[in-house]
Image (tube, rainbow, N blue to C red):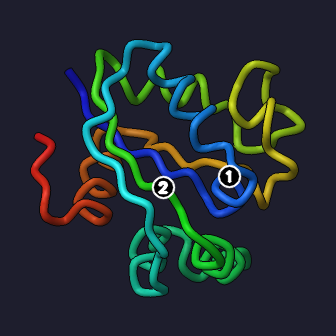
Amino acid sequence: MQNTFVAIKPDGTSRKLVGKIIQKFEDLNLNLIGLELMQVSRELAEKHYGEHKGKPFFEDLIQFITSGKIVAMAWQGHNSIEVIRKIVGVTDPLKAAPGTIRGDFALNIDQNIIHASDSPESATRELKLFFPNCNFN
């Protein structure tokens, strides 16, 4: 079993897509093991996107993720990182396949509905950031 982190971004929560997105993961037999509706602080956002600090789009990322509520989730399942990344779709919704979350729901590359950890290391780091009082290992 593998644990991973997923966040439905402010555009996903404001467009009331939370239930549809959770259903897609549950249909893949993944287990939801943590969930929190939250407002991301600037401090948390900067830690989350730390690898992008100094890049031209960093401030836009921070502004967007802190602009409204997100749904932070911990998921568990066999190869959950790969399975979730596949159903999320590529970052650019114009290139995302139909049937993926971004292909079906995202409006543009800057507001692409969802974040999903891309590796076991990222998943561990992000789960600790967003669920500091939980041990998902």
The spot of residue 67 in percent (x, y) is 65, 78
Label 2: which secondary element: strand
Give the left or right position of residue 84, taking residue 107 as reference.
left
- At 80% from the left and 30% from the top, the residue drawn is 104
Of the numbered discs in the image, which one, if any, rests on residue 34? none
Of the numbered discs in the image, which one, if any, rests on residue 71? 2
- At 20% from the left and 20% from the top, the residue drawn is 1
Query: Compared with residue 78, is residue 11 higher up or lower down, i.e. above or below?
Result: below
Q: Amino acid at mark 2?
A: Val
Q: Amino acid at mark 1?
A: Gly
Give the left or right position of residue 71, taking residue 2 as reference.
right
> Are discs 2 and 1 less than 8 Å apart at CB?
yes
The earlier-in-sequence mark between 2 and 1 is 1
Q: How many marks?
A: 2
Q: Quadrant of the C terminus?
A: top left
Of the numbered discs in the image, which one, if any, rests on residue 12? 1
- At 86% from the left and 52% from the top, the residue drawn is 108
Residue 89 found in image quarter: top right
Could you give the CA–CA distance between mark 2 and mark 1, rounded to whole angstroms?
A: 9 Å
